[in-house]
Image (tube, rainbow, N blue to C red):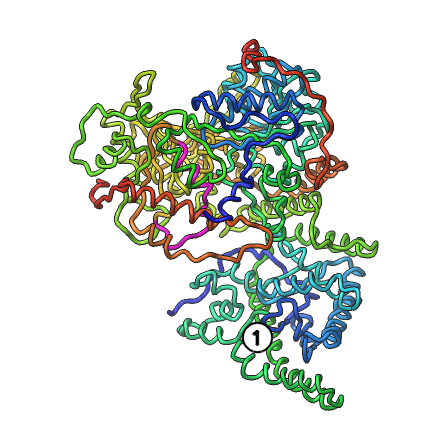
Amino acid sequence: MRQRAVCSHTHAQIVIQPHAMVWAAVGLSGEDSSLHAVQIGRWNRPPSVTAVAADPIRGDERERVFDQVAIVLERYFAWCVKRAVAPQLIVTSSSALEHLTNIAEDYRFFRSAPRTAQAARDLTYFAERAPIRGQQAVVSLAEVLSTHWVTPLPPSRERHLGIVLACIECPPGADLMALVLEAERTPMGPVTDPAFDADQLAPLLAKYRRAVRRRHVPAELQRRAQAIREVMTPVTSKLYHAIQRGVGVLIRAHLPPLPAVTEWQRQEVRAFLDTVEASQQGVQYPINDRAKLAAFRLVIREDAQANYEAAVVTDDAFGRARSVCTGQTLAGITENRRRTGHPTRRGHVHTFDVVTTQDELTVRPGDELCLADDPRLVCVVRDYRLIGGQTRVGLRVARGMNVPGVPLDGSEVTMIRAVPDWHRLGRRRAAMAERLRVLPWTHVEGGAAPATDPETPPTDLIRALEVLK
Amino acid sequence: MSARMKSRLGLDADVNRLPGDCAPELGGLGTEAERADRAVCDVLRAHYDGVPALIVPSPPGAGKTDLVEKVAAQEGGTRRRRCVIVTQTNQQAFELMMRLRAHYSVLPIALYCRHSLVLPDQMVRSAMLQIVHEPRQLPTGPCVVVANAMKLALSAVPIASFDLMIVDEAWQLANHLFLAIAGLAKRVMLVGDPGQIAPVITADTTRWQANLAGPHVPAPQALLATHPGTAVIGLPVSRRLVDDSAEIVQRAFYPNLPFTALERSTDRRVEFRTLAATHQLDGALRGIERGQTLSMVELPQAAPITTDAEIAAVIARVVDRFVIRGANVVTRDGAHRVDGRRIGVVCAHRSQVRAVRARLTPAISSEVLVETANRFQGLERDITVVWHPLAGHPRVRDFHVDAGRFCVMLSRHRVACVVVGRAGIMEVLDRYAPGDPPVLGVDTDPEFDGWFAHREILEHLINSNRVFPLARRATT
């Protein structure tokens, strides 16, 4: 295989902040929420914290690591609050993010270890922001890179940061598959290589545990703990350096940020400051959401998804081209511009056709489309006909017939589904908050229904309806 | 049958139940028509009894819309109450409005919609329909208001503005949206088909996957999870499907909602004016003549591709053969000719829709309804031709194996349904390896259920000799 990844976007969907933190952590195999070793530091700098728990199952060892994490995150959050900016954390991939989420969920209610709980609470902020499309708080680097570059590999292999980097940085003429196989040898997730576990880590861990059980002198324990640190530190170092390399690739691409990024950053700052304020008031993220909170959260996620998709089609040339190819966006030449009297009201009905040669087209009667160049022109699809290799889509203008006006016959137009609406979420949340001041009984577990008095029904229920016909 | 399969619909074994003294007479003897009418009366009576929440699960073509109309007419007309009907789309709202107006001319009906919505010409011209855009414009007295769920959720309609809320196609309403509108009425009735496509949620819902009343689950399922004692009256008879189809559809997709068909395949059948020619597709049509209302045309195995031009061509030819051979639908009331308007083509993907449309004969291309399963929900045709969702797929994936999608595809026909697929689907199903482990506390597994339904259907087709292998040249 002699191919390499190709950049498939004209704009970046994420901006790496100069203060962004790199999080390179691994847990113990089989212990999903354990934190065995971690390196944290700013991007483009060496790690400021390297912590390894000799045995992450032991409380004192775990707390020692979490103490260091808590200090770093606390300082970082304070720094961000002071400057009114949002923090940003860079991890290798979605599995690393899942590991971080597990840690956050398992330890944030740890009353016996307040520092551990504090670190977990800080990590919860990132875990909570991660599922919101367009968020700028967590950069899952393998996903970000494989979003901006198309690799010749299946999606399952694009989750490995090393492989994605191998595809992007593949020198001309090099054998890509050989590079991919080489990259694959270094684990980039939150767990260590099984062979490394069996050959190196397990014996050292067994020796350490035996020494603890036999109450060896502190110096001996220290020696055995040091041996574990020595084998674990290179593991996290590899992750840390891969992240640095990946960020470098992203920055060197010099992709201008999508216009939506400005709005996403604004949302990020607001979400962060709200979280800090809530945290100061003692509000905590619950483990399980009640109906109201769950509804709000899902609405936020759905709105973010809709805006993300709209932003990519609206402002990214590749995104729009992809949308034309998949038939989500209509691109063609206008014909048959007409103006007829409205059937009932004063005024006119404006219609025109768009003739396209798109192979795939997903528009259907009733769909709303807006002009990509000026979304104030909104049209509704009336019908479509296939004539030879062309499709003629009939549109009726719903809004914008005066300004920007109906396109002239023969003009090239691109009609898209939607543009980002940054105020929609606010409106929806306000409406929900007002409506849900009192939860309906249907959504309160075991809530009692309001009493209604039964009435005597007519003898023949169906005949009683006949009089209404 | 697995416990998972049994709980798929979110209903337990006791489908028909009402609290207290108002339990209807269930089961019993009588003709199918009597059983169907009795269920409708039970629902109408439940509202006089003041049942606060009623769930009406309904199999395909059991008269859901008719029931919704009757209940709305009873509330707004006979009982002089305020009733709101919640639809999932504007299109559904338009159709319901027109039906209500046609069937109950004296009922005060209003459509509550956004200002910029382009209404169908037929509605605009009808002087009898009231269109309102603001909460203050809503009728103050007894009325029936029709609105889509999103409009109601976002508007400032005061709490408890209505006496009854009827949610049509309730299994397509996500719980978070139901939460936003549930308080608008004192009583609720959720009517829908539990076997159809689940609500479309675009965001990640992993966080709530163990929550049976999570924001993403269908509203009736969530209501049953939080209030297990909620009254449930199932509609027992499908008026659309004939017995031959109803039996297999019920077994594969509605294991916990027993229903039968109003008519037998001998009472509603297809006859052809022109005798069979040497065309290979006539083999499949012969089966339909013999009363096999569900059959499959199988093309040879080929490289997997979503928009398979050969399948599209065969579907277009099947549609042609029905028209060319002068198919007639014969019922007790007489016979009528099958033209393009009585035929539908159901696909899984939009690209497949266009591929079929492009290959239809120009004379009938504008008449035949070619749509995706999502858009075909709630619609019916005498004859349907289905693009098998697993055709051209080398392995079972959640979208293609989705039981709801396949159920919609196989339950839109009144007389006959021809599935067009490729050989090797059974092997794909045999190779199925379950995906993620099930979530603690959740018995349902949509992917497994879909796999089960697909297997059940295919086994039935094979065992009853309803699969007609086709050579490649049949497409020409």
**Circle 1 sits on which residue?**
A192
Q: Looking at the image, which is closer to me, B156 or A460?
A: A460
In the displayed structure image, the side of residue A390 where residue A157 appears, left or right: right
Q: Which residues are magenta?
A: B392-412
Any magenta on residue B406? yes
Q: Quadrant of residue B453?
A: top left
- The x and y percentages for residue B4 are 51, 48
- Is residue A400 in view from this perspective? no
In the rendered image, the vertical position of residue B310 relative to residue B437, given as above or below: above
- Tell me the residue at 42%/48% (across/down): B452
Q: Amino acid at mark 1?
A: Thr
In the displayed structure image, the side of residue A183 where residue B229 appears, left or right: right
Q: Looking at the image, which is closer to me, A249 or B276?
A: B276
- The x and y percentages for residue B250 are 43, 37
In the displayed structure image, the side of residue A12 where residue B156 appears, left or right: right
- Tell me the residue at 58%/50% (across/down): B442
Tally of numbered discs: 1
Q: Quadrant of the N terminus of chain A?
A: bottom left
